[in-house]
Amino acid sequence: MALNFKLSPLNRRRFALFKANKRGWWSLHIFMVLFVLSLGAEMVANDKPLLVKYENSYYFPVFKRYAETEFGGEFPIAADYRSPYVQQLIEEQGDGWMLWPPIPFYYDTINYDLELPAPAPPSADNWLGTDDQARDVSSRVIYGFRISVLFALTLTILSSIIGVIIGAVQGFYGGKMDLFGQRFIEIWSGLPVLYLLIILASFVQPNFWWLLGIMLLFSWMALVDVVRAEFLRGRNLEYVRAARALGANNRIIMFRHILPNAMVATLTFFPFILTGGVITLTSLDFLGFGLPAGSPSLGELIAQGKANLQAPWLGVTAFVVLSLMLSLLVFIGEALRDAFDPRK
């Protein structure tokens, strides 16, 4: 049985307004293409072949770890497909071949065959050059793009859920709960987040989830004021009074009747919160308080560009990728804001 999803007239009008904003519409397409490609980064940039044929059998090193002995080697260790010895075993003795991804480097692969000292300039092997540790910049940019977007997206979703709930409770109940809630937010938002991160970094080795948890403690405040204002306005409207008169409890009124209308205003903030998450992670990595050393990061690449002014491709690459990412998100946010603008 085919499912037929139909948009309401209001949502069709919003979609038409969003599509009419050509800059935002095409920015969404470009961003989604880049994000999907980064999700499959292992298929684009990897130091393992996508497919290996050896003695009439096929192997998929990207998805499974194979020992060197499976290709006629002597040691039961993971096969190093960039090694001339393993390549000879597969191509000459096994009468096989290897299908490599477009960029034959993982984000932490060190290129020992550089003609110039690292950081080496762009070449046929390293399209965007290498960093000061002889790692391929193009592969690190792809993986760094994925980490930045996934971090910001996870932070945006979790902080939005918390912010919407707190703002809804404050706006719906009002009174002392709203008063004490606002005072707590004023105090909590005044805490020096960077100093707190520096102090905690001296005790704990930062990682993806550790940084996400710390930033989540503060990022939820971005939507509280918007949701609170919508609930303060909506709790006295006629349809809410009618729901109370029919005996609906507060939870149903809050999340079934008022929240859908309040989310219209909050949805326009999501791309800008996502942008803030990307900037936060990049800034922390640049200062050295972000992801662990060696992780693919745009902030770390900017720091390398600052430390190696003789290698301009490092800073320029990071700046272009970061500027493109943030510009696309801002354009998408502007199109969403126009689409949900009640005046239109």
Image (cartoon, rainbow, N blue to C red):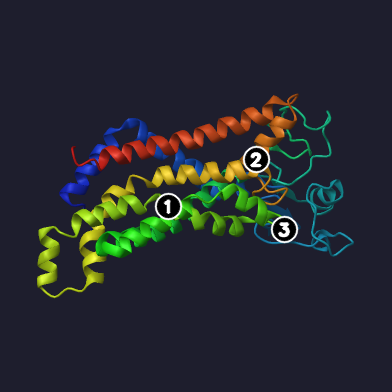
Q: Position of residue 131 (x, y in %)?
A: 74, 35
Q: Decide which of 236, 263 is in the foreground and name it.
A: 236
Find residue 25 and report its horizontal and vertical position in percent: 35, 36
Determine the residue positioned at 53% across, 54% down: 215
Q: Which residue is mark 3?
A: 56
Residue for point 25% across, 62% down: 172
Distance between mark 1 and mark 3 Cα atoms: 68 Å
Name the residue tied to disc 2.
286
Mark 3 secondary-structure assignment: loop
Closer to the camera, 344 or 229? 229
Left or right of 38? Residue 107 is right
Q: Position of residue 110 (x, y in %)?
A: 79, 43
Q: Earlier in the sequence, mark 1 or mark 3?
A: 3
| Number of other residues with Cα within 10 Å of mark 3, as a class: few under 14, some 14 to 19, many 20 or more | few
- Tag 1 residue: 186
Query: Reading the chain from its start, which is encountered first: label 1 or label 2?
Result: 1
Q: Secondary structure at mark 2?
A: helix
Identity of the residue drawn at 12% across and 61% down:
239
Image coords of residue 237 (percent x, y)? 13, 57
* The one of 79 and 328 positioned closer to us in this rendering: 328
The kind of residue on which mark 2 rests is Phe
In the picture, measured across the screen, residue 151 lies left or right of residue 92, that is left
Q: Judge from the rendering whether residue 99 lies leftward or rightward of residue 35; answer left or right.
A: right
Callout 2: few (<14), some (14-19), or many (20+) C-alpha neighbours within 10 Å? many
- Under tag 1, what secondary structure? helix
